[in-house]
Image (spheres, helix red, strand yellow):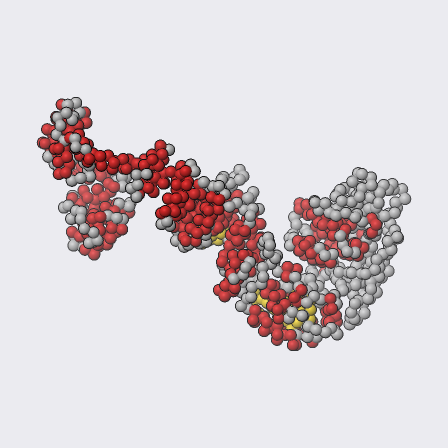
Amino acid sequence: MRLGTDLAGVAADVLVTALATPDRVRVRERFARWFQDQNASSYARQLLDTGAAEPDALEPLRAVWAPRLRVTLVHAADKNAAARQLRELVQALAPLTDTAPPAGTAIDPDAWPDTAPDPRGDVVAPDPRGDGGRGFGPDPDPCPDTVPYSREGFAPHLSHGPRGDGAPDLGPGPRGDVAPDPGSGPRGDSAPDLGPDPRPDSLPDLDAEIAPPPAPEPAPHPVSEPLPQPRPPLTGDHVDFRQAEIHGPVIGVQIQHSYGARPPIALPGPGDWPTATALEPLAHGVRAARRMRGRPPLPRYVPRDADAALVSALESVTMDGGLVVVLGEPYAGKSRTALAVLASALPQARVYAPDAGTDLRRLPDALRGATGLRVLWLDDLGGHLGDGGLDPRLLARLAGLKAVVVATLREDDFDEYRQTPRGRVLDLAQVVELPRQWSQAERARAAESPDPRLTEAAALSGAEGVAAHLAVEPRLWADFQHARRRHPRGQALVRAAVDLARCGLLGPLPQDVLVEVADGYGPPAGPEPESVEEALEWAARERYGVLPLLRRAGPRAWAAAGPLVSTARCDETFPPVDGALWQRALDVARTVEGHDVELVATLAGAAFERAIRAGDRRAMYRLGLLEEAEGHQEEAESWFRRAAEAGVPEAVGHLGRFLRRRADREAEPFLEQAAEAGDGDAATLLAEALLERAEHWLRAASTARAQRLLGDLRFCADDPEQTWLRYTNAADPRDPDLARSMGMHHLVVAEPEFARAWLQRAVDAGDTVAAQLLRVLGREGPSLNEAEEYFRDTDGYPLDIAHHGAVLERLDRTEEAEAQYKRAYEAGDAYGAYRLGALLDRQGEPDQARAWYRKAAGLGHHGARKALGEVSGGPDTVGE
């Protein structure tokens, strides 16, 4: 009778429980090694990237790793060997997690389901009963015909072992003495020392209900002293199934504790080591880059400036053995550089790459008698120092065998380890430093690559360097993508910076622009989104010790992290930049310093053309605006016409303006159409055009009324004498409006009595407007003091600031007048600067006067330009 216990489920319990304990690193590495041995490298890498688990996350983790363990077991090349190794792994690691495994596990090969994993990742097992009976299927609940594994019920010997505390007696140590208490082990914590990973080659008798564990085979290589033989195993615990009802195939599982020395892990023979050119970088410490369709997982290696120094160091240790350490900051590209140079300089060398924590003391014995160059690859050397790791004595033994040790190490770890006994071997190393920031020559080599990941990294990476850009790119992108629920406004601000960078705005972006663009994506999700300040604080946090999502580029300026921009440009699922944002980007490029306007314009033009091909009518209008800004008038008119014909309202008005600027009569219908749609600017331009036409026809007319209308039309546009002549030629007693027009003319030329006579004629003819003018003419004018008070009270009207100064100047209050002129200039009124220049000129300060004339001329004031001698005509000077 066999017990139907799910070995993969037990192993998953041990694994995920360990992820919440201090022993998670060791347990994780041991399980990853098992996956690697079963050719499940992807699972091994994913497990090594798994961090500490919170207690409430254990069940979801179990749901992930139990199916993966089952699938790996089902597809193992040698199912029995895979199950045996997993069983022994559970036996060794279960005490660390306080998870009691089931007693001895004997796996019957005939009981394995011959199925592939279903789309969810579980293995579908045969179910003879039709009730989801437990084998290797997805049903997590134990069946009635199985005994649940527990410390009390299934493996009672675990609760009353020789130590009396529920922990198994580890038996004698390697020298035959009693194993130390776990609390005083070499790790200094309460976990027992796991020792080497046992890999016995013999299988238990599958026909036996309770099979004794196999005896370990001799070590594959001679050792300096014999190992003690293990004690006979303790047996006798059993479960009686004679009264049980069995309704389907079951699997008997027994985990037997053997209280004796466990054999060390067998090192692979030197003949089995791969060559340097056969090493897979992703499996030996190199971080994955962003995946890209049609491209290999990693871009081609770009030679670094430090390669020559590394080659020289390798050549020096090839003859006599020794240690070469590639030193640098995190993400400097140490592993990639070391492996690439190693493959180039020593392509035929056989390389051994042990896991962190592997006992290396047997390595010299394994190498004795081996021919050819042998290299020990120790990525992240800190994991290979200490007990059983690399030390001066072991390095000397390896050097005596002409073996080369190549390692990588972080700068901070180098400084720390050198202060401790475990780091003494570093004093014997040849150190090659690899800076994280790339030189111009290195960037130039990367920019020449046909791989867009490299060319973009060369262009967009800053002090972090190209290697760091490539390594953190997928991780930063994941952080950005997953931030919508918890940091919706922060994600929107980052997206705004990324989108504007995609438009070519690679320099600093004003915070106000980012907020404006982010708000255009819609309101942030969630009932209480964070404030702008909180969102920016979150986005500016440095991630992975390298980059934030948004980096500060000034007091209130920001820029997106280069890796985000690279991914967004190539991710087909990321929303494209819309036309309005391209238009905004063009405005920013033209008004904010530090941006390449030509680049943004080129990218925008290409984007608009793609949108037009996709049927976007408004893109025609936007392309017309771009062509107009670039000075391409014919192309701009063509796109405006096409957009107007397609029914884009803005294009109709803009085409009218475009034609109006060149005095084309064709502008009028377009302006009228836009004016009817509410375009005030188009209405004004249409009125101007119509006034010009009116003046043309009034001039062409020979009637008196036409002369009077022309005088009214040009009343403030012509000199008074010309206006008087037009009114004189219009002397028609039947025209009632002529008297008011002539009276207004005499008012302007300061002839009040003449004006009163003409206005009275108009009043007597019933002209109410003339009556109002006549009453105003009879009032006494305001004094200078009253004028000063008036302009002071209308200080909010910007043009009256300079008028106030002019009145103050006439009152001989020149200091106050100067202050008002300066205020007027600061408000954008060129007349204030001109008046101040004239005042200083009269006060005998020509240099200061010229400076203020220059300011006024910069705002287009004609009198100032004349005072500077730049133009002629116009008034001679400001009246006294």
Q: Is residue 708 above or below residue 586?
A: above
Instruction: Indicate the position of residue 53 as horizontal and vertical percent values.
Output: 66, 50
Name the residue: 87% across, 41% down.
245
Residue at horizontal 66%, vertical 67%?
Answer: 276
Figure check: 358 above or below 667: below
Q: From where the camera sits, is residue 166 visible?
A: yes
Is residue 182 found left or right of 776 in the rendered image? Answer: right
What is the residue that sits farthest to the right in this orientation? 242
In the image, 313 versus 384, the foreground residue is 313
Q: Position of residue 27 (x, y in %)?
A: 71, 56
Residue at the extreme left of the image, as rendered: 753
Q: Which of 655 and 147 is in front in this view?
A: 655
The answer to whether residue 116 is left or right of residue 823 is: right
- Give residue 39's position: percent from left, percent from top: 72, 57
The answer to whether residue 558 of the structure is visible from this angle is no
In this view of the protein, which residue sits in the foreground, 160 or 263? 263
Foreground of the two, 309 or 147 = 309
State whether residue 457 is above or below residue 370. above
Count of numbered labels shown in the rendering = 0
Residue at 70% from the left image edge and 66% from the top image edge: 274
* Image location of residue 214, percent across then percent down: 84, 59
